[in-house]
Amino acid sequence: MAAVGFLALWAWLAPGLAFLLLALIVPLRRSGKPAAWLSIMVSLGSLLAAVAAWRSTVPDMARRILWEWIPVEDGVLTSVGVLADADSLLMLILVALVSFLVQVYSLGYLSDESPASLGRYYTYQSLFAFSMMGLVIAPNFVQLFICWELVGLCSYLLIGYWYPRPEAARAAVKAFWITKAGDAFFLIGIVMLWNRTGTFDFAELFQLARSGGEALAGLGLVTFFIYLGAAGKSAQFPFHVWLPDAMEGPTPVSALIHAATMVTAGVYLLFRTAFLFEQTPDVLAAVGWIGAFTALLAATLACVQSDIKRVLAYSTVSQLGYMMAAIGAGFPAVGFLHLLTHGVFKALLFLAAGAVIHAVATNDIHAMGGLARRMPQTFVVFLIGTLSLAGIPFFAGFFSKEEILGAAWAGGLTVPFGMLVVAAFLTAFYMFRVVIIAFLGDPAPAAAGHGAHGPAHAHDAPVIMTLPLWILAALAMAIGIWFSISHPEVEFGPPAWLTPLAVGVAVAGIALAWLVYRRRAISADRLFERFAWIGEAAVERFWLDDLFALVYRRMILGVAGAVGWVDRYIVDGILNVLSASTLTAGDRLRRIQTGQAQDYVYGIALGVLLLMVWMRWPR
Amino acid sequence: MSLESITFWGLAAVLVASSLAVVLTRNLFHSVLYLAMSLTATAGVFLSLDAEFLAAIQLLLYAGGVVTIVVFAIVVTERLVGDRITQTSRQILTGLILSGALLVALLVVFRRGPLTVPRPAMIGDLTRAIGESLLTSYVLPFELLGVLLLVALVGALYFARPDD
Amino acid sequence: MASFPVLSIITWAPFVGAILIMFLARRNAALVRWLAVLSTSVSLVLSIAVYAAYDRDAAGFQFYEDFPLVPALGINYQLGIDGMSLLMVLLTSIIIFAGTWASWTVKVRSQEFYALLLVLVTGVYGVFVSLDLFVLFLFYEIAVLPMYLLIGIWGSSGEVRPQGVFGWALGRTGVGTKEYAAMKLTLYLLFGSAFILVGILALYVAGDSSSFSFLEMELTQFDPTLQAWVFLAFYVGFGILAGIWPLHTWSPDGHASAPTAVSMLHAGVLMKLGAYGVVRLGMGLLPDGTLQWAWLVGTIACVNIVYGAFSAMAQTDLKYVIAYSSVSHMGVVMLGMATLTEVGLNGSVFQMFAHGIMTGLFFALVGLVYEKAHSREIFKMSGFGRMMPGIATAFTIAGLSSLGLPATAGFVAELLTFLGAWQSAYPWWLFPGVLGAYLTSVYVLRVTKQIFWGPPSTDPHFQHLPDARGPEWAALWILVTTIVLFGVWPSLALGPVDTATMPLLNRLWVLQ
Amino acid sequence: MNGLSVGGPLGLEVGLAVLMLLVFIVGLVMPSEDRRRVGVLAAIGLVILFGLAWRTEGGTEMFRGALVQDELALFFKRLFILATLIGVLASLPLRAVAFARRATEYYLAILTSLLGMLVLASARDLILLFVAFELMSIPLYYLSGFLKREPEAVEAALKFFLVGTVSSAVLAYGLSFIYGAAGTTDVRGIAAAVAVGHPMMLLGMLLALGGLGFKIAAFPFHMWVPDTYEAASTPFVAWLSVAPKAAGFVVIFRLYLDGMGDGVLFWVPAAAGLATVTIIGGNLMALPQQNVKRLLAYSGVAHIGYMLIGLAAVSANGVAMMLFYLVAYLFGNMGAFLVVEVVSQAEGSEGLGAYRGLAQRSPILALCMLLFLLSLGGIPFVAGFWAKLYVFWAAAEQGLYWLVLVGAVLTVVALFYYLLIAKSMYIDAPARRDPIPVAPLLSFCIFLCVLGVVIMGLYPKPLVVAALRAAGPLF
Amino acid sequence: MTLQAYLTLAAMLFCIGLFGVLTRRNTIGILLGIELMLNAVNINFVAFARFLGDVSGMVFTVFTICITVAEVALGLALVIMIFRVRRTAVADHLDLLRG
């Protein structure tokens, strides 16, 4: 079974190789299309390797390949390598798959870019694939952290892909700074953990946890810090503010990084290190609470967005909250399952949205309308994604979402359970709001001015873009159907009313959206007024972005300004005072040199006298 | 009170008084005259210390020579300036404090010094002894003194010559 | 290799180059440059060879050379290299080699420029390889002095408005001008060397071997009180060069005013020389003193990290940002050594190397930007990424290393340092350290965003700026490759370093 | 008279006297318009004398030990002759009329002063010491006013004279107490009186230290120095800044250290205190100077302070290191003054501005000046570094770490003003581009000084050995 | 009379001379002050010599007196020179060189 490890290794290293080639061979990168194809082919190979590896696994088997990375006197501080087991390989497949599809899709989406620019894009993509896979199969915290940071870097680079646009530039650094803040805590957590246990290795830590030794007692702070890292990356409240802004990046990037893979890394981390978190139930509870709250909060926010990508972004935040809630409830596998399904359908949604944006050249749903007729394929796949997300039976999200609700209930998190239910309702509502406004209805009149790219002239994307859509849609359907048929065993017994409840709130959400936006039975404005207390807050994003801006401007930059001033005018000032005083002292002292001979005699007489005094004379 | 002490105190009084006059008189010419008086009194002090030869040198070289050159210098400079040289003093107070402090310091040292040595009897002819040692053990300084006087003379001449 | 004086050749090759330049290359700028490249590449090649040939199992000082200089006083020209100095020599070679390429465009009085630069480098090498404290001090002084002329002649002036309670003093000293910066740097560092000298003399007098040899002093047990004082002297003396707070203010002014290659060398190597001095002389000779003062060293280091980062953020002049970032990063170096742990000290040494390369790259880039745009004002520049993608990429990589992003050398260093900090007697040191790393990400990316991202500038001065060219690429490639190589494969450096730090720490731990 | 022969204890002095006589006679017969050749004669004579000094063996004495030719005396005599030789050589190209017409007086005065120094180096009797001291001093007064048509020069001479005479009086007054306490004019009688702590002796010693402090120009007895240096002709100043100060030190060695045994420890606070104020005072006052000669004058004061650190060490090492320092100072300081002379001949100014862009006009000259400045500043590979290091080392041996620190820190202040000159030469742009003409003799002297500075910097060992040997007889 | 008395007398004379040097404005006046100081030195030497019964102090005095004369001669020549060049002999006015 050694092949499993090596297959995984190759799946991981192949994109790295592609990245190196693209980064180092400048003409290749500048050539655009060839660079893209290189990257795509490599990621296809990577996908195949991952699938092959997964196919040859057996349950409860983990394969490790390690190389020494940082040596110390008596051995190895940390190593790098591969930890291939069923979970990581499944995740690996997801990453490889979405990555491959997105790369294919991008070829069409970014067809207007210059070759050099396109080459740059695929370089980043390769790097991302490499980093993300490294994260997935990381055997220890250090490698995980390394890749964790690298995917953050890729996110930064890809959000800022259109760097001349000020919004893109701002969003890129914002994303980086906020996730990095979480990472800082993550690092602290790792450091503390190492000091306690002397290892970074998951397997060794797992053994420690199983043996229940003293070594793992009182890990609360450690796991909490690790969780903060995950919260930053997985956009948990209050770190979620970066994710909607990250939509400034190209849409395929959003699909890959900010929906399917990178943002789920936090969830994956918690899933992966669940054995540690189990030691600290308090932290787990906090994870659950925050997750549920995030889910609800983001769902509210999604309801008032008019930017299609932002709706999807908040929905991602919301879904991440679900996953976290499941883990917090003590059922990490459930969260992981939702991670996988969400990865598929959210990528689908984003790519479909991308196709729309590509066609109509705007993100504003109110500027769209009636696209179902002009872009039927896109409409279908978008609808599939939406139904999945809403948790309608026979679609991918149904089973996993229901399980999360059940997990929350079973985990005793009653209030979070309530929040999740409300969020589920809102999810169905806001998604159908988008579907109805953008795809059904009438084309927006204002769009006439958009010329060839207006909704009126929109048409389905070329094959290279629709093919990935269809693949993902099929997959979402397949997963949904497969789960519905097989109904796999779960660890907990969900209450019987759960399925009706889940389906019920979803349908209710859809119905409300239908009533409001399609039938206009209920005025949208009235509805908004009714919920003004929360609606306005949601429009203002609960002032969280303002809060972060305040912290940045007033606190960080403010303190920086103060420190900079102090450094220049006080610390350095004192030094200058010393030197200026020395100069002045010289100036003053030379005044004793009056030029008059008698004063010089004074010097002699005084000198003799002082000499006598100095020698303690008379003794 | 012995004759010796009366002589000493008398000389001391004259010496100090004339010295003070040297540094306090406004008229420079009078200063010089007081200096001559002071130097003469010093010669008296030398006599009281049985140093007749030195007293003689003192009178000849100092009271005679120095005072003469100084007077000469005054005359020359007065001619150059064109009016009588009166002189004032500067910073009298600080000068007084500083020299007073030095005096106090010296006197304090004297108080604790082993200075109560008895005055030994005279050892033969002092003048002869001085002469002998000048030409034996101190012949080198004596020769150098000659060079010194020569070079001082050359220097004084260099400045005093009005030409080139 | 024992008889072949390879360390001497590494050390003196630049000096010979300087002399050749002074005598052979009168008014022939091209010859000057090629001579400089030649002499630095001799050092570089030999450094790499030494690095490869260093026997990691034997450890200790190797490539030993010894030649009596003033036997009466126990002064010997004694050279040797261990895992730590090995890395530092390599760093020096890389930086100066790149620096020579990066200053290809120095046109004014280039003969003197390169000659001084190379003399300076000899001093730097000398400090790293000499085992005789006295000779070390000699080299130290050589490494400091040429800086005055290098900054004074080829530097550039900035603008600082004197204000605040001490404005009068700032006005009097002429703050902001290159002359001011040159004088400040030189005098401040020489001020530090006064303390070093006193310390060395004290050890020499107190030791019974009447020799300045490090190897012999190492065997001497000095009185703990003496150790405390001498350690303090070394800490202040070398610490000034390492930019410890609040004695760091020479560094921003000096580095901002210096010409490119000099900033590279100074921030990249000379500041390490200070840290190296503290480790080698302070920790190496004075275990008791180290234990007594570790709390101070670490605490000041924390101040450095956070304070430097905030100060960097406040700057509007690009060079000042980089200069303050050095202050911040040197805090990491000092923090690592203060932890008195294996990982911490290894991290510290690694950070010396990492920061050296990284800041060298930074200054090379800033120099290029300045050379092309004639501006250092961050907020006047915008959208340069379109015109100079190469520079932008390299700048980003340097920035990433600076904020401790994995796969760059900076990450390994910071990780190790932080591990050490939490392991040390003062675990709270970890937090300022991490905070500093975070703040670094804020100011570095802010600057990157402002200069290279965003819409292209409309300022007519900033149109059609070229990217890096021929020789400049050489500098950038060398440095970028090194950053990434050591970030991906840290054991390349950590292997030898560990052999040098462990004996040192063992002596300390015995006392604890 | 065996002692007067070549190699005898008075051989050099006699040789010098013969030279003086020759100069005097030749000067008389020469045409009065240009007697410059006299200087050549003096120079040749000094070369011969210098050769003789190398051949002379130490360890002889005359007048029952009142005159001793030990290693210390020989060291100083060689130093005096060398300094005088450089001074005379550098004086030859002087242009002022006075130097042509009155060359006899000029060189005779210098040689007379040298005679005083030579005797002083050997003198171990108070009378001989005092007379030699005055013999050395009196010519200096009028040499400094040699340009008698220039108001500054005469003013400087008068100040020098007045202050100098007062300090002579103080010295003589001190010597009288020493004599009174020791009961003899023999220097070797001092030790006993110091050992019993005779108050008169200590008083005398302190007063004498005040008088000598004038000669070596220690703060606050230094005040004549800047004025005199600024106004007098530069080659003379170059010599004045070295030789008489060295002579002052030899007197200090003889009076305060020679054969003193443990009594030397009594002088540590005095020397350390003087050293401290001198270093601080000299360096601070040099800071604001714009006239390079004046600046060098103050820096010279500071250097005396550093030498006093060596004295404060009161050990054979300390004295030896001071001797080393003196030689380093000789080359560095004389060299610097000679460059000042070259520049002022070309530019007519001694201000800092005259040095602007010197490195681009005359790179070699600028490099020489830089080397001198670095040596004075105590930078490695030139003589001054070892000098400073050695005195610090000697002081550290005595545990005077604070003094070492003061000295080392104030070195930084000193470097400030040295670097200001360097800045002018190297950083500032020149007003003109033409090279500065250098008289061949001057360039020879400068070359000599550079050679000294560099060789001592690279290979200090022989001189250290010599200095240690010279300091040996004192302890 | 005791030695102390002579020494005290000399000390007073010395300080009076110093006072003169410090306060007189005319350079010739200053010279007179110096004369007084040296005179004090002579008294000291002679007194010590007498009380020690040793002749060398007296010899010293001979030298001092001669040297003093030489100095005065040179000094006065300088004063005359100053008069020629600067038209003044007031020491306060001689401050071209300062600072």
Image (cartoon, coloured by chain):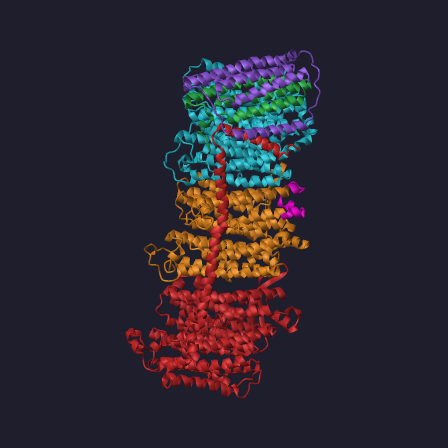
Q: Is residue D412 left or right of residue B4?
A: left
**Colour of chain C in the image:** orange
Point out residue E31 in the picture as x, y percentages from the top left corner. 51, 22
B61 inside magenta stretch: no
Point out residue D432 in the picture as x, y percentages from the top left corner. 36, 36
Residue C455 vs B55, above or below: the answer is below
Q: Residue at x 38, y 71 (%)?
A: A107
**Residue C122 showing in the rendered view:** no
Quarter of the image for residue D474 reads: top right
Q: Residue at x 46, y 40 (%)?
A: C20
Residue A289 vs A489, above or below: the answer is above
Residue C297 vs A480, above or below: the answer is above
- Quadrant that contains the C terminus of chain D: top right
Q: Nearer the viewer, residue C169 or B142?
A: C169
Point out residue C198 in the picture as x, y percentages from the top left corner. 59, 42
In the image, which lettered chain appears cyan? Answer: D
In the image, which lettered chain appears purple? Answer: B
Q: Nearer the viewer, residue D414 or C504?
A: D414
**Residue A409 showing in the rendered view:** yes
**Colour of chain A in the image:** red
**Colour of chain E in the image:** green
- Quadrant that contains the N terminus of chain D: top right
Point out residue A177 in the picture as x, y percentages from the top left corner. 47, 65
Residue A427 vs D253, above or below: the answer is below
Q: Is residue C35 left or right of residue C420?
A: left
Residue at the limit of the structure toward the front, as seen here: B1
Q: Nearer the viewer, residue C422 or C497?
A: C422
Q: How many marks?
A: 0
The magenta region covers C205-228
C206 inside magenta stretch: yes
